[in-house]
Amino acid sequence: MSPASRRESSSRSRRWTIADFVVAAGVCLAAACLFFPAILNSRYHHQLNVCQMKMRDIGLALTDYSMNDRRGMFPAIPAKGNMAVAGMYAPTLVDNGFVDDPNVFYCPAKSNTIVLKIPHVDDILSLSAEAPELQVVQGNMGGDYAYTLGYYENGKLRGVRNQGREFYPVLADEPLEHLSDSVITSHGSGQNLFFEDGRVAFLSKRTRPGTENDDLF
């Protein structure tokens, strides 16, 4: 062979065929199938951990509030008026100095939440009961965590005293009352719960662990 013919043969050998492209595309697709789920799973666990840490901070603030209350009560929710919503716990904690950073009330896994700030108690009381913005404030001021309303006794709404109970839920991500067993939330199949004894746990069911029909809520 002459040098020119050897160069031409070498050039042809370096050209990609359709089969080469198919194989390369298959390798890239297989790598993507392994890589992207790992990223999504990592992001999911990060969001779950952040929401748990924020819930733990709120729980500590609630515990401190109860320890400073002469009766050992968590923030009580009025039965009527502008403050008669579960989310009132957040402005109460902020106004009394138990929470410094209002962002602690927002969970990154619930990206649909749009709240600029936690309102002050005086701002809530200053709104007219007929004012359209009152409903907006009431619906958002609790952030992404559902707070216990307490319980009814003799037709009167009672607040909750901190007794350190192991399975008494004080905060939850999304209790979803219409689901009696499994819970599907922004965290997947389950939710974060803060219990009265200071624990934060991720549970996949509404029932108390170790029981069949003891609904936590």
Image (tube, rainbow, N blue to C red):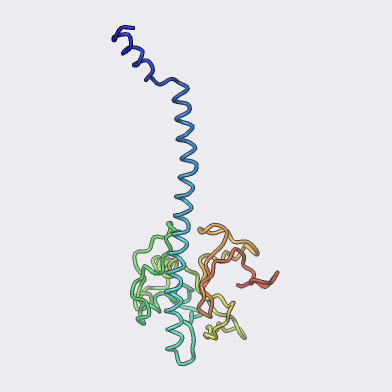
Q: Quadrant of residue 105?
A: bottom left
* Residue farthest along the bottom direction in this orientation: 70
Number of marks drawn: 0
- Say if residue 34 shows up in the picture: yes
Q: x and y percent of residue 205 in the render?
A: 62, 65
Between 93 and 203, the residue placed more toward the observer is 203
Q: x and y percent of residue 191 in the render?
A: 54, 64
Residue for point 60% across, 66% down: 177
Compared with 169, 185 (above or below) is above
* Residue farthest along the right direction in this orientation: 212
Q: x and y percent of residue 70 in the render?
A: 45, 92
Between 131 and 182, the residue placed more toward the observer is 182
Residue for point 46% across, 50% down: 40
Is 126 on the left or on the right of 197, as rendered?
left
Which part of the image, by quadrant, shows the N terminus?
Answer: top left
Q: x and y percent of residue 11 in the render?
A: 34, 16
